[in-house]
Amino acid sequence: MATEPAIDIRGLRKSYGSLEAVRGIDLRVERGEVFSLLGPNGAGKTTTVEILEGHRSRSAGEVSVLGHDPGRNDPALKRQVGIVLQQTGVDLYLTVREVVEMIAGYYPAPRDVDEVIGLAGLTEQRDQRVKKLSGGQRRRVDLAVALAGDPELLFLDEPTTGFDPSARRQAWETVRGLTALGKTIFLTTHFMDEAQALADRLAIIADGVIVAAGTASELIGASSTTSRIRFRLPDGSRPPDDSGARADGAWWEIETDAPTRAVHDLTGWALESGTTLIDLEITRRSLEDVYLQLTADAEATE
Ligand code: ATP
């Protein structure tokens, strides 16, 4: 069915003995979407993802992945899902092409081997042994392995950890290439810029509960203060008390949900008093700011 979501989670719970790691979560990932699950260490991300992948059992709730219950270990589902774990083992003595060819051989309708190698950004390395590749290039082999069977749905677990900045950008391009092919991607990452750059929608999990879900803009817009004004002042100057500015080292900072008014008041004061606002900048709150606030709030209410 065209409208059936790629992933549908309702009331999911998972306990390890007396510890309830996932405490009733609901999530829906549409087909063709890049969805990112974010959360601090121990929040329940791996538990959730491994339940979706069929690698862990659940304690309660309903889970559907491409219309299948992943708890049933249905081979038809396994053929449609690709997984890039944080660490995988491929035979280091095989070449990139041999690895991808071997994996493709397990699938009934694999994607063309050279195309997979190209998608993973390994065309130049295709005849090199995996052993000779750098750490970042080996991660790309993991991606190629996950793509070999031409999956509908791809789980990417911290796919760019250990990448240099240009390799990260290349990996982002790869992910975008996959979405252009209509694939659904479930991404866990600790990099907020990565989630912001790639995800159509994201959810933040803290202490086993979803504390926010939506597009990055929705999450940023939903926070009470959406903009930050920063500036420095010449020695001996202070901003007016009613500006709401707080000192942050050599900087002054104003957080506001009405930046037009705040900038108007601040620059009006500066012009009137002949004070220079050094390095004045106005930034929208970032996803990282929202994330830090939400996860800190969740910790405080525990
Ligand atoms: P990280 O970002 O560090 O990978 P995470 O969000 O993936 O963290 P999980 O690995 O899902 O977190 O762990 C959630 C909670 O469940 C943690 O408190 C963890 O200690 C606990 N936990 C995870 N796996 C097990 C297990 N097999 N047995 C017992 N407790 C577990």
Image (spheres, grey):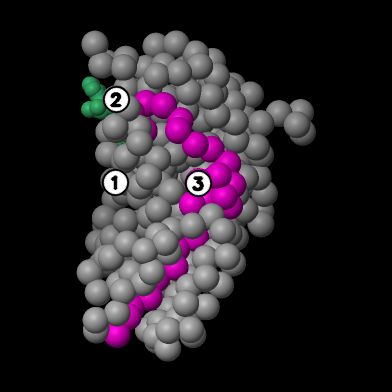
User: Does the residue tagged 3 have its C-beta within 8 Å of any atom of ligand 1?
Assistant: no
Which label lies toward us, 1 or 2?
A: 2
Q: Is residue 209 visible?
A: yes
Residue at figure coordinates x 59%, y 47% from the top left: 218
In the image, is residue 213 above or below residue 281?
above
Helix, strand or loop at mark 2: loop
> Which residue has dot 1 on it?
87
Which label lies toward us, 1 or 3?
A: 3
- Which mark, residue 229? none
Taking the magenta stretch, the answer to whether it contains residue 239 is no
> Which residue has dot 3 on it?
224
> Which residue has dot 2 on it?
302
Please rate how many residues cluster around mark 2, counting C-alpha atoms within 10 Å: few if below 14, some from 14 to 19, many from 20. Answer: few
Residue at figure coordinates x 27%, y 39% from the top left: 41
In the image, what residue type sits under mark 2? Glu
In the image, is residue 19 above or below residue 111?
above
Query: Do labels 3 and 2 touch, CB within 8 Å?
Result: no
Please rate how many residues cluster around mark 1, counting C-alpha atoms within 10 Å: few if below 14, some from 14 to 19, many from 20. Answer: few
- Magenta segment: 206-234
Front position in the image: 101 or 181: 181
Distance of label 1 from label 3 (alpha carbons): 39 Å
Residue at figure coordinates x 77%, y 33% from the top left: 2
In the image, is residue 248 above or below residue 40?
below
Distance of label 1 from label 2 (alpha carbons): 32 Å
